[in-house]
Image (cartoon, rainbow, N blue to C red):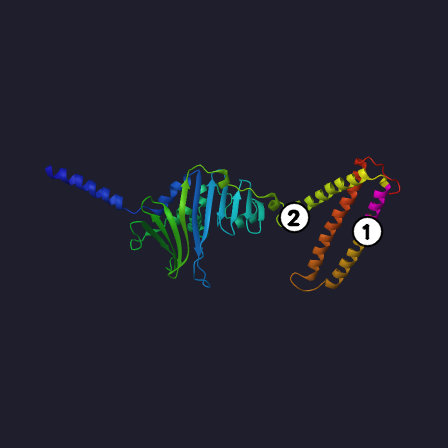
Amino acid sequence: MNLARFIVPLLCTVIAVAQATEPVPLESLAAPLLKARTYCESGKWATWFQADPSFSETHYRVCAHSDGRFKYVQNPGRPGQLEIWSDGRKLHRYVDYGRGYQQYDLSERAAEDWYGRPRETVPALHSRLFRWATRSPAGLDLLGSLRGYQINDALSDPRHTVYEHWDSDRRGGARIQVATADGAIVRYENWYDGTLRSYIEITARQVDQLVADSELGQEVPLTARYSLQNNPRAFVAGLFAVAVIAGLVFWTWLFARAEDPENVVRVRRRLWRYLAWALAGVATLLGFLAAITWGGSGHPPAIFYVMALAVLAAIAFGLAACFLLASYVGQAFAGKKPVASD
């Protein structure tokens, strides 16, 4: 009986120690993050190229909300900053350098090409590290991808526990570092033939914290959103609107200050004539260029540039025509009676 008093506590202690030292499955460390309503992550990644053995690091930050909004910033605060975000309906992409801006419906293929799985509503699955670690080609989700990792005691230290997974041929594999202090997954490495090919490292993570709207979206300057490069239709429509408004203001002012409206009408008639001559000359020139370049070789062929010039000429003559047509409305605004002979 006295012996049992010592044996039972001893067995309990041994069991507790064994449970404490039992390896924690890697997927169990990631699973709680999948329940978060908001998730933010900052870090850096790098890829090795044979032509350039040095690693060029790219910094990033990503934040996501369970309502479908997210924002990914590449090289934040650095040259070449790229921002991709979703308001839950469209995917937006803006490059500070060059002020390039595009938007796509989330169902479009282009949205998937620029940002994989843009309709993902689990915030933690926007993590760059988790996306790298997910073996989608093998038909696995995140937890399934992490399930095959084993601890490498030789590479682990008091600060980090190293998990690794190798392909069947032992040539390719991956390693994941977990912070010993809090069990946070902080680094993913891709290896092939004993060489580190790429890695991604998380430097900061916020889970289920209040996320500002600026972390989930971006205001694009109007000059970038509706520029010729980013939105040619809106840009050209804006040019025509400006031509009409400028024509109204100019011709109303000109008719209002004219003592004899017939003088202004003669000026307008002369401008119409100049415009017709210019149109005939440009059309002749473009026809000649089209004739000598038709069927030519090259990439793109020379006829492509002739067609582009024709489009630009059509826009230019259209703007001039709108400017002159606005003169008739301006004449009415100025209270000058139209001349029948015009």
Q: Residue 6: x and y, percent?
A: 14, 39
Check if residue 263 falls in the magenta segment.
Answer: yes
Quarter of the image for the C terminus: give it: top right
Main SS class of the magenta portion in the image: helix
Q: Residue 181: x and y, percent?
A: 31, 45
Q: Nearer the viewer, residue 301 or 43?
A: 43
Q: Amino acid at mark 1?
A: Tyr
For label 2, the crowd category at 10 Å Cα-Cα, with few meaning under 14, some 14 to 19 and many 20 or more, is: few
Q: Which residues are magenta?
A: 262-271
Q: Nearer the viewer, mark 2 or mark 1?
A: 1
For label 1, the crowd category at 10 Å Cα-Cα, with few meaning under 14, some 14 to 19 and many 20 or more, is: few
Give the residue at x 33% y 52%.
162
Can you say whether 35 is above or below 285 in the image?
above
Q: Which mark is residue 274?
A: 1
Give the residue at x 70% y 60%.
303
Q: Residue 243: x and y, percent?
A: 73, 44
Q: Is residue 302 visible?
A: yes
Q: Which mark is residue 232?
A: 2
Q: Nearer the viewer, residue 110 or 15?
A: 110
Q: Nearer the viewer, residue 62 or 267?
A: 267
Q: From mark 2 to mark 1, how far is it between C-alphas?
A: 28 Å
Q: Is residue 140 visible?
A: no
Q: Is residue 325 left or right of residue 137?
A: right
Give the residue at x 72% y 50%.
315
Q: Is residue 56 left or right of residue 267?
A: left
Quarter of the image for the N terminus: give it: top left
Q: Nearer the viewer, residue 287 or 112?
A: 287
Helix, strand or loop under label 1: helix
- Quadrant of the image occupied by residue 168: bottom left
